[in-house]
Structures are given as structure tokens and as C-alpha cells.
Image (spheres, rainbow, N blue to C red):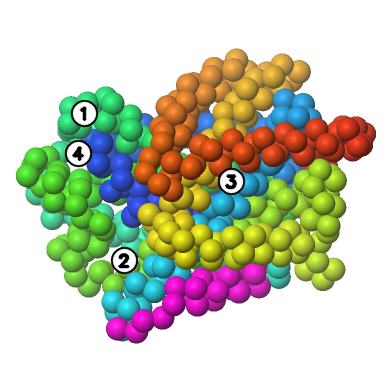
Amino acid sequence: MPNAIALSAASMAPVLAVVLNAPAGASTAGAALPLSFLVAFVLSLFVASSVIQFATHLPSSGSFYVFNRHGLGTAGGFMTGWMYALGYALFDLGLFTAFGGFAQTYVQGTFGAILPWYLFSALAMVIVLVLSIRSIKTSVQVDLTMLGIEITAFVLLAVIAIARGGSGNDIAYFSPAMSASGFSGVGYGVVFAILSFVGFEAAATLGEETKDPRRNIPRAVLTAVVVVGTFYVFVMYALAAGYGLNNPGHMAQFVRDANPFITLARIDAPWLTQIVSLIAMFGIFSCFLAIHNTVVRVLYSMGRDGMLPRGLGKTHPKFHSPANAIWTVMGFTVLCGVPIAIWIGPGATGAYGFTGAIGTVLVVVVYLMSQVSLIRFSSGLKDRNTWKHVIFPVIAMLGLLYPLWASIQPGSAPFNLVPIIDVILIVGGIVIFLVVRAKDPEKVERLGSVLAE
């Protein structure tokens, strides 16, 4: 179970999330940024509840692909798998380029050496490839180790910032009044906070590789959300207190700061500055490894069912890992990631931000579908619970609508292409499903039928 927790927690990439999403969310939430993350934390618990209920009854490496097949039928199951796999493949692509961009900047700033970003990305890809093919256990243990180091360092920085914050410590950070835009500002901040929780369900893809999955997978998902959610709220409060955001004069400086955590380290704990920079880079790699291991298992399940090329459902003869799916995702990541990064850059506002925005829309749609799916699936359960199987999913759906709406708002180029690309990808999935169903309806009926037992 600790390894399953690690996969979910690493997929959320807690350090990467606070480094990138905190400044973005603060532009509208202002000093109420801790409140935005607290609201997102509570909402994520409701969304996680559906995964927990499904994983208890349907343990499988297909995750939402299998869950929604049993709740929404074959069409819903296929489209879920299609969008979920594409969304995570796009995250994988963005992290591949982001690691290279961040490592290039770090090496240049620290050692003065100018090296191409793609050399660092290629090195990361080779390590991910070896780990994912040889052993999922080794991969997630690497994630668990790196995650422990990352969270420990940032919690230490947060404690120091709070201790030295003085008058910057203020419970009012959890009030909408601390945002210049009030409730709407807090709401838009929730959008970026929700993005920080995407990936919490990754442990569900280990449903066929974990002991006692009906017990351990739900516990892993819940533990990951609670631990990382608590980390987010605590660190966001420390950021506000350390920067003294209850002083309006400090807010303008904070919004202009590209990396406020580095600034906090320089001011409050200079000896942590280099450590924080290195850990941010490790956080990108840890997330890259976790996301890669997640998406290949969904593709493996769909290939095994024949809904995608059956070769994807083949495992390595020695290590029993989904080797063909691993090689396929690697090829997609490199062949698409390098041109996109050359086009708009490998950093947060380049390939990482662009592909992440496309993938986030797809995954949030999957989350919404899973809430409807649970309500329908639970109607046939003997232990149906109105709160867990109906009310919680409805609350989750209502909470996800605003982040979805905000995510598809047109922005500047190339981000104005995000909604168009998402529509094209969804339509492509519908066409593939209709073609497969016309050729082999019996194959479609077997979709998502393999469980851990």
C-alpha cells in the first residue's frame, strides 16, 4: 500500500504544483490563496470518494476505463479510457520537456554551462524507461523516496517562514475578503488548486498489482489526497504568512515574483535555497515517472481488450511489465514533445502549460463522467449508500463544473487552440469506437471485463 500511495501522491506532484500553481492562482485569489486550496482540498475528497467506491468493487489496471464501462456502458467506458489515456499522455509529454527546461536553467545558473534542454530530457526518459520496464515496485519506491525528501524540505521551509512571519501570520487568509475580487477571485484560484490534485487516482491503475486491492487501493487513494491536501493548505498559508500578504503593499511584489518559494528561502533560510531549487527539479522527474507508469497501464488494459491495437496488451517476457505500452508512450512523448517544445519552449508557459491545459480538460471530463457512472452503477448494489453513492457524486459534479468552464476559456495563442484540440480528440475517439463496434460488437461487449480476481 505505501507504494500505491506513492504513485498517487507523485502523480499529483505536490512540490511542482505549489511552485507553478501558487503564483498563477494568487493572481486572482490574492491573499485568500490558502482558502482556494482548502476549498479544492474538500472538493477533491468528494471526487476521490467515487474512485474509492469503484476501486472497492472493481479493482483493475484500467481505472476509470473499467469503472465507467460498468456504470455508463461500453461507449462510456471506451470514451473514458480514450480521454484518460490521452490526457495523461499529454501530461507525460509536458513533463518530459519541462524537466529539460528546468534542468537547463538550473545548470546554467549554478555552473554557468549552457547545454541543450533536450539532453536533460533524454536522460530523464532513459531512466524512466528502464525503471518502468524492469519493475513497477522499483519505480514507485523511487517516487516514494523522492516524495519524502521533497515534502520534508518544503514543510521545513514552511515552518521557518511561519516562525519568522511575525505580523504576516493571519487567520484571515481563509476569508474571501482577502481577495480583491471576493468570492469570484477565490473561485478562480480554486481552478489552479484543483489542477494540483489531478492524478490523485493513479493508485487505481495498480489494482491488478497490489495485494488485497479492494482494501488497499481505496486506502491508498484516500491517504494520498489527505496527506497532499494537508501539505498544500499548510504550505499555502506559510507562503502567505512569509510574504506578509495581509499587507496590500506586498501583494504586487508577490504577483511579480516568478518563484516566491525561492524568494522565501533566500530571505528566511538561505541555506535551503539550492536545496529547494534541486527539489523542484526532482519533483518534475518524480511526477514524470508516476504519470508514465499510470498511462501505460490504461493503454495496456485497452489493448488487452482489443479496443486499441492488441500489441499494447502484451507484457515483457521477463519483467511482466506492459512493455509495448511503455515503448508506445515513450515514442509519442519524444516524437511530439520535441517539436512542440522547439515551437513554444519547454517551460511552464510553453509545452508543459500547453499540453497540460489540453490534458486537464480531458481528465476533468473523465472525473465528471465517473460521478454519473457511480450513481448508475450503485443502483444495482446491495450496500448502496445514499450519501456515498448519490449525494457525494452530485456535490463533486457541481464543484467540477466551474474549473472545467474556466479551463476552456480562450486565451492567447497557442492556448486559444486548447478547446479546439480537445473537441477534435473527443470526436476522434467517438469515430474509433463506432468503427470497432461495427466490425466486432462482441469485442466491444467484453470491454473492461478483466478485474484483479
Q: CA distance from mark 3 to mark 1?
A: 31 Å
Pick whichever of labels 4 and 2 is earlier in the sequence: 4
Q: CA distance from mark 4 to mark 2?
A: 23 Å
Please name which of the two marks, 3 or 4, marks the residue nearer to the observer: 3
Q: Circle 2 sits in a helix, a strand or a loop, which is it?
A: helix
At 29% from the left and 34% from the top, the residue drawn is 35
Q: Residue at x 88, y 32 (%)?
A: 438
At 73% from the left and 50% from the top, the residue drawn is: 299
- Read off the magenta span: 112-132
Q: Earlier in the sequence, mark 3 or mark 1?
A: 3
**Nearest-to-viewer mark from 1 and 2:** 1
Screen quadrant of the C terminus: top right
Q: Secondary structure at mark 1?
A: loop
Secondary element at tag 3:
helix
- What residue is pinned by disc 1? 181
Rendered location of residue 401, percent (x, y): 47, 25
Q: CA distance from mark 3 to mark 4?
A: 31 Å
Amino acid at dot 2: Val
Residue underneath mark 3: 87
The residue that label 4 is drawn on is 31
In contact (CB < 8 Å): disc 3 and disc 2: no
The Cα atoms of the two marked residues, 1 and 2, are separated by 32 Å
The spot of residue 359 in percent (x, y) is 54, 45
**Quadrant assignment, res 187:** top left
- Residue 327 falls left or right of residue 363: right
Decide if residue 198 is on the left or right side of residue 167: right
Query: In the image shown, does 308 or 39 lie closer to the viewer?
Result: 308
Picture disc at residue 276: 2
